[in-house]
Image (cartoon, helix red, strand yellow):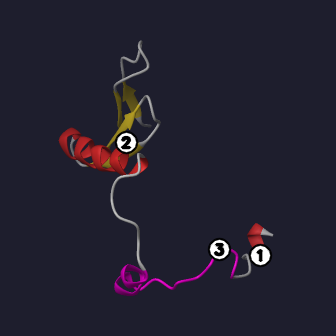
Amino acid sequence: MASATRDASNGEGVEFIHEDDGSITAKDIETGVASFGDTKAEALRMLAEAIELHEGGGEPVTDEDLEVWGLEDAEPGDEELPDFME
């Protein structure tokens, strides 16, 4: 069972959730954005990056990126849903 630590009386700050597998999730209370790592420091670094992307930072994914990552350039809804989702 995961456990959380937080002091969010003003709606700001970070909540740390200690997961059953030993990882730590860091959640920004104001935005609800979360990320995780093996340590608090790693979770905070990942959270900082996630918040930056959430706020419009970073660079858009290009067709070249999709090719490098081995992902198809498919539009949402191009494929049929699996039976369990119908």
- According to the picture, the residue beneath numbered tag 2 turns out to be 19
* CA distance for labels 2 and 1: 32 Å
Q: In the rendered structure, which amino acid carries the disc numbered 3?
A: Pro
Residue 24: x percent and y percent?
31, 42
Q: Circle 1 — which element?
A: helix
* SS at circle 3: loop
Give the alpha-carbon distance from disc 3 to disc 2, as whole Å: 32 Å
Region rendered in magenta: 63-78
- Neighbor class of circle 3 (other Cα within 10 Å; few <14, some 14-19, many 20+) is few
Upstream in sequence: badge 3 or badge 1: 3
Work out whether 6 lies above or below 2. above
Q: Earlier in the sequence, mark 3 or mark 2?
A: 2
State which mark lies toward you, 3 or 1.
Answer: 3
In primary-sequence order, the first of circles 2 and 1 is: 2
The residue under the point 42% across, 36% down is 2
Circle 3 is placed at which residue position?
76
Q: Quadrant of residue 66?
A: bottom left
